Image (cartoon, helix red, strand yellow):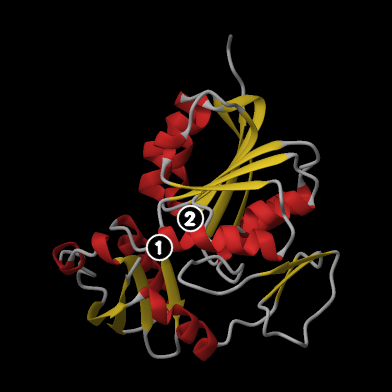
Amino acid sequence: MDYQKITITLAPDNQDFRDILMAALSETGFESFVENDDNLEAYIQAPMFDKTSIDAISGGPLYSFTYVSELIPDQNWNEVWEKNYFKPLVVANQCVVRAPFHTDYPKAEYEIVIEPKMAFGTGNHETTSLMMEFILENDMKDKTILDMGCGTGILSMLASMRGAKRILAIDIDQWSFESTVENCKLNNCINVEAKKGDVSLLGSEKFDVIFANIHKNVLIEDMPKYSSVLKNNGLLFMSGFYENDYTDINQKAEKLNLKTNGSKTRNRWMAACFLMQNTN
């Protein structure tokens, strides 16, 4: 799938205004951001790009912004990644994430090799690394797991390495589906089944653990389906939203018998864990 990239210049430019703008853009479907010294880059799946919704965002009297947009064809993504040089990442001193072209990287208990393509999820973004920390802290042995918005398959692979019994990984994006399949083969994670689609693919199978690293609106919309396929006392880990969005997320969770069970924040991004407590 093609992506639309917008490069944004803020005036004045500071971290608070960047965070406010990124939160507003995430509400319109932007799913990844890169912060540079003098500008901000935002990425959205090309079919979801809506110039009108961006132009409607206002910084009021606090700040203003201008932007230029650029279509990023999917076949160019490897070139983009190599240009920006995806560096090896160590998560919680336990897991190293690297690309096949890396030769010098730290050693860790778990090693995940990612073939960088047109799918976000190398662990460098806060939401992914926070979810990985949750996986490292919780028991995955012999668990059945659902990974919604699987991207590169990084969360599925870490869960597999941590002893999960079966993982179903789902993403609406063709590149993400293909990337998950390729990366799981590369890492010998043979118990991960990848599918292209959304929550409509889910049937009667119940899971011990669910990962959902997607943006806020999709999480809230799909949470009822997540809860319907989560076993009693199962865990739902969600990220892809800012900490000031947590109230909306939690209110929806409470209506579905999902009890808050911990959270993590980094640079205002949040990951949260919920425990399913059926009343029946």
Please tell me whether residue 256 is drawn above or below residue 23 in the rendered image: above
- From the top left corner, tell me how far across and down residue 100 is, in percent: 68, 79
- For disc 2, the neighbor class at 10 Å (few under 14, some 14 to 19, many from 20) is many
Task: Look at the image and tell me whether residue 266 can be seen.
Answer: no
Report the residue marked by disc 1.
31
101 to the left or right of 212: right
Please name the amino acid that badge 2 sits on: Gly
Q: Earlier in the sequence, mark 1 or mark 2?
A: 1
Of 64 and 272, nearer the camera is: 272
Please name the amino acid that badge 1 sits on: Glu
Going 54% across and 67% down the picture, which residue do you hit?
Answer: 267
- For disc 1, the neighbor class at 10 Å (few under 14, some 14 to 19, many from 20) is some
Query: Which mark is drawn over residue 241?
Result: none
Going 13% across and 64% down the picture, which residue do you hit?
Answer: 52
Task: Look at the image and tell me whether residue 171 can be seen.
Answer: yes
Alpha carbon separation for disc pair 1 and 2: 8 Å
- From the top left corner, tell me how far across and down residue 56 is, in percent: 16, 64
Of 195 and 143, nearer the camera is: 195
- From the top left corner, tell me how far across and down residue 49 is, in percent: 23, 65
Image quadrant occupied by the C terminus: top right
Report the residue marked by disc 2.
240
Going 66% across and 78% down the picture, which residue do you hit?
Answer: 99
Asked if the residues shown at circle 1 and circle 2 are in contact, with their CB atoms under 8 angstroms apart, the answer is yes
